């Protein structure tokens, strides 16, 4: 790819496929290796939280691959990295916003083949949506306050997805807490 290849729509289609591949590996890594430490990035169950965590880590891995591939051609390395860190911290939430469209409309479980198709589709769409934002964000200069904010969000995400991997919180998002 040329110097600006990482800003083209075609690139984001490829990025979406790479993300899906990495997500698939991360999804099953604990089944394959069964080391407790692998649970930090992988999943032992099919919970919404686990899928959010896998999206977060998968996007961070894509960031590392992208940076390794494009680092010599980047005109704004800071913007490139921080745009993708922002995307990494919000992709779990974008994933959930899109995924819950079907439960909101269907009001019942859908057959597994449809659910899997929907799940992979929304992950791909999430990458495309974030790609549109990254194209703009990576041009930014990121003053100190913005840099600190991005790093705090990254740190909070790392904490959130690690802490609740080993012990679930006492309160859930969609249910009333026990009284």
Image (cartoon, grey):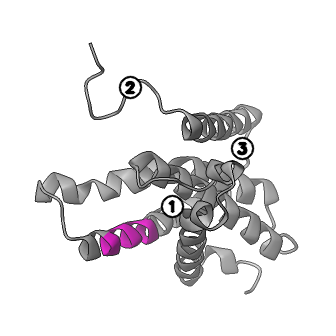
Report the disc number at residue 39. Answer: none
Q: Residue 9, position in %: x, y?
A: 53, 79
Residue 12: percent from left, percent from top: 55, 76
Q: Is residue 99 left or right of residue 20?
A: left
User: Which callout, 1 or 3, points to the residue nearer the camera?
Assistant: 1
Residue 13 coordinates in the image, percent (x, y): 52, 80
First along the sequence among labels 1 and 2: 1
Residue sitting farthest toward the front: 34
**Residue with the mark numbered 3:** 142
| Residue that label 1 marks | 130
Q: Which residues are magenta?
A: 116-125
**Residue found at x 60% / y 60%:** 30
Dominant SS of magenta comes to helix
Quadrant location, the C terminus: top left
Q: How far is mark 1 from mark 3, CA to CA? A: 18 Å
The residue at which mark 2 appears reads as 171
Q: Quadrant of the N terminus?
A: bottom right
């Amino acid at each position: 790819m040329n110097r600006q290849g990482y800003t083209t729509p075609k690139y984001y289609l490829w990025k979406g496929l790479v993300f899906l591949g990495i997500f698939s590996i991360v999804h099953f890594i604990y089944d394959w290796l069964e080391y407790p430490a692998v649970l930090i990035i992988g999943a032992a169950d099919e919970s919404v939280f686990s899928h959010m965590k896998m999206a977060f880590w998968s996007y961070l891995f894509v960031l590392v691959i992208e940076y390794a591939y494009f680092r010599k051609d980047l005109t704004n390395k800071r913007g490139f990295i921080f745009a993708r860190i922002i995307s990494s911290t919000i992709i779990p939430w974008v994933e959930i916003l899109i995924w819950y469209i079907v439960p909101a409309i269907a009001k019942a479980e859908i057959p597994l083949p449809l659910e899997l198709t929907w799940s992979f589709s929304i992950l791909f769409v999430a990458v495309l949506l974030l790609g549109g934002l990254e194209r703009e964000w990576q041009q930014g200069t990121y003053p100190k306050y913005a840099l600190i904010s991005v790093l705090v969000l990254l740190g909070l995400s790392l904490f959130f997805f690690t802490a609740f991997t080993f012990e679930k919180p006492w309160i859930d998002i969609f249910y009333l807490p026990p009284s």
